[in-house]
Amino acid sequence: AQSVAQPEDQVNVAEGNPLTVKCTYSVSGNPYLFWYVQYPNRGLQFLLKYITGDNLVKGSYGFEAEFNKSQTSFHLKKPSALVSDSALYFCAVRDGDTGGFKTIFGAGTRLFVKA
Amino acid sequence: KAGVTQTPRYLIKTRGQQVTLSCSPISGHRSVSWYQQTPGQGLQFLFEYFSETQRNKGNFPGRFSGRQFSNSRSEMNVSTLELGDSALYLCASSAGLAGGIEQFFGPGTRLTVL
């Protein structure tokens, strides 16, 4: 079965420092991988995705993610964190076929960026 | 373009009642998915609709049901509410049914069951 793991409940980083939010996945075929962010009292917002091609994917707000097939990982990164990046981050994988899909989310990682 | 809208934003019900939540997708989007978000279980997939047909379903009891109308608007219904149904219910729409298409989420409906 497809699954997504986010091993860290919380990540703390100082403003201006690089940040990494970890994600590993398990899929039976080619993965469709996503990162979403959730700010307080709001729905999820799409950040970036990996379908195929370059292993380094660039997304919104300066975020990027590195797809590593051998390690089955899709870590979210940002070179310089901002206080406004503090939020809940979800890694997700899409599972299914043309008959229908479902998105499986990781448990989420809360990012705290300290000024 | 207007985003995904969900109504109502907040609901308070008592055990045994039923509830209907509504979702209007982004204009032109034909795929609508529903998720339940709780602190303990995280985000869990409920079902996905495309062109008025349920295409996939998560592991929820039959008390949870949904439908999609010809204008792509969707409703989900929960009957015989239980305390454990208290959650944030999120609706998401996407432009198509392909696996690599991102979803756009509404603000959610927060359901409290007393």
Image (tube, rainbow, N blue to C red):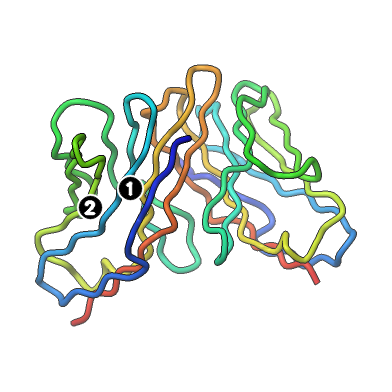
Estimate how packed mark 2 is, as few (under 14), some (14 to 19) or many (20 or more) residues with alpha carbons within 10 Å: many
Marks 2,1: beta carbons within 8 A:
yes
For label 1, the residue is: A35
Q: Given the current orientation, which residue lies at the most extreme bottom position?
A: A115
The picture places residue B13, in percent across and down from the top left corner, at: 82, 65
Quarter in which the N terminus of chain B is drawn: top left
For label 2, the residue is: A76
Q: Quadrant of residue B88 in the image?
A: bottom right
Disc 2 to disc 1, C-alpha distance: 8 Å
Q: Quadrant of residue B49 in the image?
A: top right
The picture places residue B99, in percent across and down from the top left corner, at: 41, 27
Residue at x-position 80% and y-position 53%: B19
Q: Nearer the viewer, residue A44 or B2?
A: A44
Q: Nearer the viewer, residue A65 or B93?
A: A65
Label located before the other in sequence (2 or 1): 1
Q: What is the total number of numbered labels drawn onto the structure image?
A: 2
Residue at x-position 49% and y-position 47%: B105
A98 w.r.t. A106: above or below: above
Amino acid on which disc 2 is placed: Leu
- Would residue B69 be found to the left or right of residue A20 on screen? right
- Would residue A46 be found to the left or right of residue A15 on screen? right
B90 w.r.t. B16: above or below: above
- Would residue B40 be found to the left or right of residue B67 on screen? left
